[in-house]
Amino acid sequence: MNKPYELTAQEWGEVAAVRDVVEGWGLDDDAEEVRGALLASLVYGVRFDYVTDGPGYAGSLYLLKGGGAPEIPPMALVETDDGLRVVEWD
C-alpha cells in the first residue's frame, strides 16, 4: 500500500548521519542518536516503501520537510549500496 510511515528513532539517526542533511539543517557532529532526535524535532519526516512502476528502484524513500515556505520541495533520500543519499530535484 502506498502510505507514509513514521520514522523510527533508528531511521532518524540514519537520516541525520547523511552529510547533506547535517549541513542542510545545521546539525552538530554529535552522536547519531542525538542528531536524529534533534532532526526529528525540527522537520517533518516520513518513509515510503517505494517501488517504481517498471524496472528500477525498490526500497525506502524518505521525505524531509522543514518549517519553511510550503512551495520549497522536500529533501528526498533513497537507499543505495553505499547507504542513504539525497535525490537531486531537476
Image (cartoon, rainbow, N blue to C red):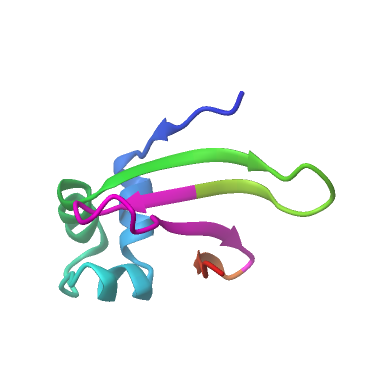
Residue at the image point whose x is 51% and y is 27% from the top: 3
- Furthest residue toward front: 71
Q: Position of residue 16 (x, y in %)?
A: 31, 61
Q: Quadrant of the C terminus?
A: bottom right
71 within the magenta span: yes
Q: Indicate the quadrant where residue 53 lies.
A: top right
Q: Is residue 81 above or below residue 64?
A: below
63 within the magenta span: yes
Q: For this rendering, which residue is in front, 57 or 53? A: 53
Q: Position of residue 28 (x, y in %)?
A: 15, 73
Residue 6 horizontal side relative to residue 51, left or right? left
Residue at the image point whose x is 52% and y is 67% from the top: 89
Residue at the image point whose x is 32% and y is 50% from the top: 12
Residue at the image point whose x is 61% and y is 63% from the top: 80
Q: For this rendering, which residue is in front, 57 or 71? A: 71
> Total marks drawn?
0
Q: Is residue 30 above or below residue 58?
A: below
Q: Quadrant of the N terminus?
A: top right
Q: Position of residue 61 (x, y in %)?
A: 53, 48
Q: Indicate the quadrant where residue 68 lies.
A: bottom left
- Furthest residue toward right: 55
Q: Which residues are magenta?
A: 62-81
- Furthest residue toward top: 1
Q: For this rendering, which residue is in front, 71 or 47? A: 71
Residue 49 horizontal side relative to residue 26, left or right? right
Q: Position of residue 83 (x, y in %)?
A: 53, 65
